[in-house]
Amino acid sequence: MTDQIGAIVNSNSHIDYVCQLTGPLERERQPATDAYAFGAFVAIDLPRQPSAAQGPPAEPPSLIGVIYNTLLVNPNFTNLGPRLTSYAEQTVFSPDLIDETAMLVGILALGWHDGARMQQGTPRFAAEVSAPVRTLTPGEVRQFHRDTGGSLTLRYAAALLALNNPLVPALLLEIIDRLESIFPREQALLHVMRDNVAWKSIVRPAG
Amino acid sequence: MERPETNNQNPESPIGTVKGPGEALHEFTFIAPDPERQLKNGEFVYYTAPVDGGERRILGRITARAAVKLFPDTFMADPTVPPQTVAAMLGYESEATELFELTVTVLGYYDERLNDFTNPRVPPQGGAPIFIAEDEWLTALLSRVRRGELGSAHIGDLLSRDPGAVPVALDVRDFTGTHLAIIASTGSGKSYLAGVLLEELMMPYNRAAALVIDPHGEYDTLQQTQNLPQFRDGSYGPKVRILRPDDLRVRISSLTLPDLRYLLTNLSEKMHYQLGRAFRYAQRTWGEDKYTLEQLYMAVREVGDGAQAEENPNDVDPTTGALIWRLGAALGGSGIFHDFENIELDELFQPGMCTLVQLNEVEQRQQQVIVATLLRRVYQARIDTQRGKLQREDRNHLPFPVFCLLEEAHNFAPANADAVSSDALKTILSEGRKFGVGVGLISQRPGRLDSDVLSQCMTQCIMRITNPIDQNRIAESVESVGRDMLKELPALSKGQVIVSGASVNTPLMLRVRTRRTEHGGQDIDAPDEWRKWFENEQPARAADNALLLEKELERDEDGMLWA
């Protein structure tokens, strides 16, 4: 399991969450830039369901999502007045100001892990505020993209495209590029999908 | 005909769902996934509707098929990756990947009283189920007669079904009464179909009196019917008589004035006039049908200018001389036109007998005159027999209907030219029904066939036609075949035929059945013949030459060397 990169602070819809990355004052180790890069797969912890309490699952349930957006929050932006302390002194004299400066990432939930196995699709349960977020390991990404029959699956692609978000085509291309390195045998299949998305998002708008 | 099952008890599950009305009033559309590819163009489907207080099956024919759901083209970018795999990756794992919209032309329910389909004008409800018509029901419905019944000609089975599943029999009564046309381009199997038809006519359940005008001599193999057990029934066995060009005889006195004018080419006005006078003179003097070529010459001289001709026969006027010369060239040198001999009609026609008149090696104008004379005589004989003018002992007594099949019919009734046989054919096509003279026309160039002649044939068998002029002629002349069927013409394969008109209940696309006798109209296998020449002929020639070389050469009186 990887380290936590942040926590859920808000949501825009059932599948669209906002995660605040761990700040410099919260933990000693800051998340690596790769961990919250565009197209990185993450897991958002879900509260345990009472019904599932009888048999303890191997892992806690979680939403599986992908980082599709990044926002910077800086309360000092546009505050052009003079300040008596230098930035180095601010950690001592005004730590709240440092704390309010944050990096937010948008996460789209693409599936879930019910404790036993991973599935793609719109999850039934929603994450809670402050739910920890961590990146998926390459093994977990591979597992997430295999169906029960062992075939490569990309069921969330249609749902992503339906969002009509300008970042989605680039996100899909990024995901497919990542998957090509994870699934070398399915490269031809992924190429068809990549070309399809690229044509619609790159060639057709320019034509 | 047995009443088909009309109760709404459908053992089979529906194959589609009605979408709504089509473009034309008698059309509707339905949606079907058709995973088994059953719903081909021309396939028969039905829905049920209330008619006269009961539910009846309303039959229709599929006339168009369009896809309404297909994989996106981009899913097919890589031939090694099936689009189904791409769809499955995206989460679409269903096998229902296609959906079709099918247009159906409503034929209606079969009305036994009218002996035809009646459109009840009750459109199907949107969402109503559509069923595919069962083989047995269709078999009973499409043909007016059952295979093997009196007056049936089983020519094949429905193309959209499995071979042999829905046999179709033409009604012999209809096509021998209201005539038949077989139209097909070369190599699409028209002679084969004609062979099948003649086989059926010779079957014990038909025993027809048939005559085939065979300009290429390709129906010889029909003789095999005489030995095959399928054609025998008790004492009955078909006869096949072949008249080769050497056996053909047309008595000169049986030729009409138009026949003579047609045979003698490049006649001047004066010659036309003199020939007419001479013809009438001969008829008056020696009686109709009783003069010879020599007497015709005499008649030409008699009516010619210049009385001196009688005193000095060598000094005739130029017109008389030219006319006599032409008569001699056309009639005198021919082995066919004869002073006394004529083929008697009872030699040509007899129930249970098929006569093949082979006209290969006969010049085309002579072919036309022979056919015109023959048709005219048959028609007149039938009229006279029907009206009681001829009795059993009379020479041309013909007390049964006859059927004449003409190969290369465009030569006998050409579209933009006058042929002497055209008039005789047109008379029979328009009036022959009343007197039991049926005609079947076979042509590979309907564009060159007289459109009146073609439109008088009420049963049409149309095979593959790719020439657009020919297709247009068919569209103009053959009303019973819908546009949807005509679109299929270039796509038909060898041995597939569209049959429409009087002998079937609705236009049908059929697969012609296998012939019981061998097919005689096959092309020469040129490479095989060439190879045989090297194997057989060349060694024989080499041997002959070797013999010659062994002989000593001798010089004749002219100084030439001879072996």
Image (cartoon, rainbow, N blue to C red):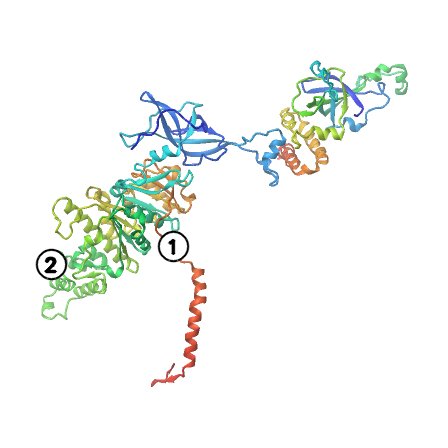
Q: Quadrant of residue B271?
A: bottom left
**Viewer-proximal residue, A183 or A105?**
A183
What residue type is disc 2 on?
A: Tyr
Would residue B249 appear left or right of A55 to someone viewing this image? Answer: left
- Figure check: B70 above or below A11: below
When asked about the image quadrant of residue A189, the answer is: top right
Image quadrant of residue A94? top right
Secondary structure of residue under mark 2: helix
Q: Which residue is mark 2?
A: B281
Dot 1, crowdedness within 10 Å: few (<14), some or many (≥20)? few
Q: Residues within 10 Å of mark 2 (few under 14, many from 20)?
A: some
Q: Residue at x 41, y 44 (%)?
A: B492
Q: Which mark is residue B522?
A: 1
Image spot of residue A36 (x, y percent): 77, 26
Foreground of the two, B29 or B315: B29
Whether residue A74 appears in this view of the structure is yes
Decide if residue A178 is on the left or right side of residue B366. right
The chain letter under disc 1 is B
Percent coordinates x, y for residue B270 in the rendering: 17, 59
Quadrant for the N terminus of chain B, please.
Answer: top left
Q: CA distance from mark 2 to mark 1?
A: 49 Å
Which numbered dot is residue A104? none
